[in-house]
Each structure stands twice: as C-alpha cells, then as structure tokens.
Amino acid sequence: MREASFAVLVAARSSGELLLTRRPSKGLLGGLWEFPSVEVAAGEDLEEACCGVAEALCAELPEGVLA
C-alpha cells in the first residue's frame, strides 16, 4: 500500500460557512464533498504545499494562519 501525506485547507467564515470542493464524479468517493487538499511530496515544505492549495483556488492566505 502506498503512503501519502496531504496538506488540507480548512477555510471558514465567521458565519460558519466552510469552503469545500467536489470530488470528480468517477473514481473513489466520486461526487462527494471535501476540503481542498494537495499531496505533499517527500521533503516538500508543508507551508509551500498549503500555499499551493490556496493558489489553486485563486485565494490568498493571510500571514500567520497556517497551523
């Protein structure tokens, strides 16, 4: 079995609304909703991976929000 690490972006408004993306209709868990994520390559910086998720969504992460 292949092991993989992922960076997941959880974005919420003060009203409680969450940012979700929909999985492709075909394949594992097709059509279900999920938090935006990206696979983190071995040795890749986690902060860079998180910024990659935001860039893919055309979003900007404010300073100091990564946990």
Image (cartoon, grey):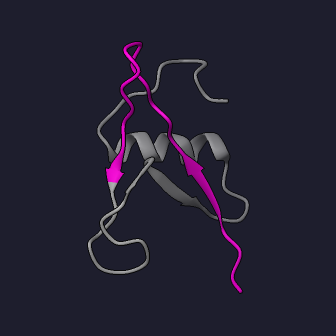
Q: Residue furthest top?
A: 14
Q: Is residue 37 above or below residue 54?
A: below
Q: Residue at x 48, y 52 (%)?
A: 37
Q: Main secondary structure of the magenta part?
A: loop
Q: Position of residue 34 (x, y in %)?
A: 42, 52
Q: Position of residue 28 (x, y in %)?
A: 43, 77
Q: Nearer the viewer, residue 17 or 62?
A: 17
Q: Is residue 26 above or below residue 5?
A: below
Left or right, residue 4 beside residue 30? right
- Residue 26: which quarter of the image? bottom left
* 41 within the magenta span: no
Quadrant for the C terminus, please.
Answer: top right
- Residue 66: which quarter of the image? top right
Q: Is residue 33 above or below residue 28?
A: above
Quadrant for the N terminus, please.
Answer: bottom right
Left or right, residue 38 beside residue 2? left
Q: Position of residue 51 (x, y in %)?
A: 49, 40
Q: Residue at x 39, y 19 (%)?
A: 13
What is the span of residues highlighted in magenta in the rendered image? 1-21
